[in-house]
Image: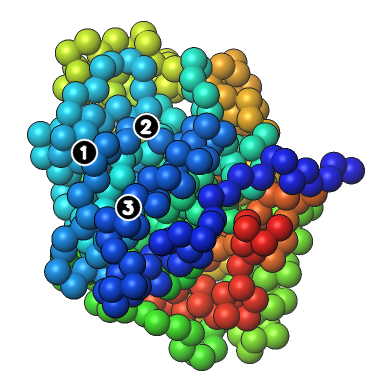
Amino acid sequence: MKTFDERTRVHAFRDDALGEHDAVGLAEAIRRGEVGAAEAARDAAARVRAVEERLHAVQTHVEIPVPGAAAGGAFAGVPSFVKDNTDHQGLPTGHGSAAFTPRPARRHAPFARQFLSSGVTVLGKTRLPEFGFSPSTEYENAEPVRNPWNTGHSAGGSSGGSAALVAAGAVPIAHANDGGGSIRIPAACCGLVGLKPTRGRVVPNAQSRQLPLDLVADGIVSRSVRDTAAFLAAAETYWRNPKLPPLGLVEGPSGKRLRIGFLLDSPNGVASDTATREAVTETATRLERLGHTVEPVEMTIDPRFTEDFLTYWGMLSFLLGATGRTLGPDFDRHRMDGLSRGLRETYVENWRRTPGVLRRLKRTKVAYAAAFRGLDLLLTPVLAHPAPPIGRLAPTVPYPELVERILAYVAFTPVDNVVGTPSISLPSTRATDEGLPIGVMFSGRPGSERTLLDVAFTLEADRPFRRIQDL
């Protein structure tokens, strides 16, 4: 049996302006004048420098950050980071790729404007695997992003850099986005809260809207449920989709009794490991003790779902290879990493299947809705097993073996991206012998973020999440 080695743990918590505040707490301290926004930015930058040599989470630093100035913003003055697949004016957007030389963005992306409207102070941009394709933030010729709970393991992906910084206490929150699990996966790996909103809940991604199936939703990773709730309320203040029910600010558990179904193994037949099954089962038991009804359910999706999602994934890599010069004039698809090249080549072999793939993926919402009859939420693992060791999912692994490993790991999250439904990863009370967190996931019907936050607040109040600084 492996045992936890404290030397593999990294965190930046200290007695400074940030203290142990979450984003809501720090914003309140700034509003009361107990902490200055410039002081918070300075101390956060020092925290980032203290952990960066071991975590490798940052792509770009802002040399002189400008404190957030949004009047009354929920996070006014709170230091944060933007993920490096989203344009922030004046900063290069590299998408985690060595295939081109990134140029400074001329303007903020639409979601960046929404994020900035909350008042955050941007300290830079966080790293992601090439184009966000991998569930582990690793590279062919660069240091991987490491998990602050155990640096021998992955921080997840694709929002791995953001998750590593937040889990280590360098900043309270950071931007993340999710096209197949990329908010929820790193949240699970790093013991964080990660909510993927309903499709259309936040400002749509301009690139995704041009695709036949929009998989990507933007959000944050955080250490507290109230930070995630406050972010969604602030985002809604900036822009609200009239096609979805209004959300408002959720401030705690409602006490409403919920009917929750649960799955231990994925709908596409991948079995979760023992530690993960125990984490989900223990969460179900806690919910029953708290007065909720929890019962096992089945979700029968098309047996070709995994193959179809992989084909669509490959189509995205193919399109990036074909249009990459829009990112930089020196773009060379031959310099894309092994995973991206393998996905592209697989799609070239199977492109004729595209119409059928799209039809079947869009029909997944029928099976999803059937599984939810009579239920408020669905409880599942986030991943089939906890964060893997560095190297297991690296793009240097031969493509056929790498894809097999990825599909045996990321077996639960993509369904919500295809259907467009909201889903949240929460830390369970369990950890592995190596000290790694194990996440559990709740998914809901379109527009049901309030219910997801309700159950998240309930579990957090019942037993506060493990804190890296307490180990």
Q: Looking at the picture, which amino acid does disc 1 mark?
A: Asp
Earlier sequence position, callout 1 versus callout 2: 2
Coordinates of residue 49 in the picture (x, y in percent) = 45, 39
- Which element carries disc 3, helix, strand or loop? helix
Q: Is residue 139 left or right of residue 88?
A: right
Q: Residue at x 33, y 67 (%)?
A: 35
Answer above or below: position of 430 versus 94.
Answer: below
Q: Are marks 1 and 3 in contact (CB under 8 Å)?
A: no
Q: Looking at the picture, which amino acid does disc 2 mark?
A: Gln
Q: Are marks 3 and 2 in contact (CB under 8 Å)?
A: no
Q: Are marks 1 and 2 in contact (CB under 8 Å)?
A: no
Which of the numbered marks, if any, corresponds to residue 87? Answer: 1
Q: In the image, which is nearer the foreground, mark 3 or mark 2?
A: 3
Q: Residue at x 69, y 66 (%)?
A: 429
Q: Looking at the picture, which amino acid does disc 3 mark?
A: Ala
Residue bearing mark 3: 41
